[in-house]
Image (spheres, helix red, strand yellow):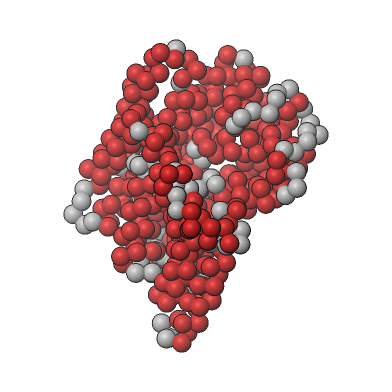
Amino acid sequence: MNNRLSWRNSLFIGSMLFGLFFGAGNLIFPVFLGQQAGHNVGLAVFGFLLTGIGLPLLGVAGMGLTRSNSVFELSEHVNRPFAYIFTLLLYLTIGPFFATPRLATTSFQMGVSPFIPLVHHRLVLAIFSVVFFATAWWFARKPSKLMTYVGKWLTPIFLILLGILIVTALVKPMGDFSALPQGMYKKSPVLTGFTEGYNTMDALASLVFGVVVIDSIKDLGITKPAQIAKETIKSGAISIVLMGILYSLLAIIGTMSLGKLHLAENGGTTLAQVFNYYFGSVGSLLLALIVIIACLKTAIGLISSFGDSMTEMFPGTNYQLMIGVASVVSCVIANLGLTNLIKYSTPVLMFIYPLAIVLILLAVLSPILGTSKWLYGITLLFTIVPAIFAGIENLPKNLQIHSILTINQLLPFSSMGLGWIIPALIGLIVGYILSKLNHI
């Protein structure tokens, strides 16, 4: 057996992980940030990178450091009932109930709909989503081949196509960095960028995709837990370096675009306008290919991870059946109920996200703090209450509970969606003390 991966294989796994992470949203966020931040773009990007790539790296590293083979195994450090509930909520929300269907609709809206008359949108969306998820299912059938499919094929194609735009925009800039910052980017660009990176939700994806990385490393013959941990962290580092470079360059392009374009409503519009400026009608086709490949890569990873997780949590279930169910459900929701579902999925995401971040931080700190159930349990207990508050705050207005909203507003940083930080820190201290007193 090999004791370590060759740099070639490490690079392929890192490329695969980057490919799984970098969906259409990752293209849109930094471009829009660049437009809004203006001459404060450097500070805004710094804040964005802290959470946009920092949290995903910690998530992948945490899986490696705790030698966890899955999200379920990591969350079992709290207790088994929590592990079942948290893992199911995570995979259903970031999988077939929300994030995965959105990949098809996003790639359709940005890549296909500009070429189709409005009257035919529903029919073409139905056909497109069937083809999209059939393709994702086909690639996800063999998890051992994900490194080849995503790391060796789709990611390089994606990078080449996106590289054409980036090089062109840098060689022939649309403007400079003199634009005035907008909104919160005027007074606190670092903190605003930090919050934008937080909103990418890639910390959740890191727990999901960390499993894919670990499985790929094992398939290449690495069996020692300590070496698996090292290779997982190495792959994560390769991935986030790529992400950080692209985020920075896309933000710069967004800022310079103000030399020729007006501030757009969102990054998708800006990206389309930039492509059209440089490449004319061909730009729309180039953007379509980039967006569809970006979304397809992520869909493959999410569907495969869903199948892996369900078969681990419920022994006896069939991987092929689970990825089939995930693909079909995602396809149906993409066509029938995505808009309404977002209203109810967002509160779940806001509830899960603090729990995921705390789990990640506990995992990363495990070499120092240990993995005591007292530590994990008390810290998560203190985090769950403000996480529930955050979820309620994001419910449709008719379902919100005003008394809870009032309590939530009393928590420090709640206005930024970070009201859980102080309670979690208190829980960490209490949990650590109890773990030492009980010697567990």
Please state the horizontal and vertical placement of residue 79, each as a whole percent of the image.
34, 69
Q: Is residue 189 visible?
A: yes
Q: Residue furthest front?
A: 403
Q: Residue furthest left?
A: 316
Which sits in the foreground, 239 or 395?
395
- In this rendering, the answer to whether 420 lies above or below 254 is below
Which sits in the foreground, 236 or 225?
236
Which sits in the foreground, 284 or 101?
101
Q: Is residue 156 visible?
A: no
Question: What's the residue at 64%, 28% (across, down)?
Answer: 264
Please state the horizontal and vertical placement of residue 251, each as a whole percent of the image.
67, 37
Q: Quadrant of residue 186?
A: top right
Q: Quadrant of residue 352?
A: bottom left
Q: Residue furthest right?
A: 178
Please state the horizontal and vertical placement of residue 318, each as a whole percent of the image.
21, 48
Q: Does residue 318 appear to the left or right of 55 in the view shown? A: left
- In this rendering, the answer to whether 392 lies above or below 150 is below
Question: What's the residue at 38%, 46% (across, down)?
Answer: 93
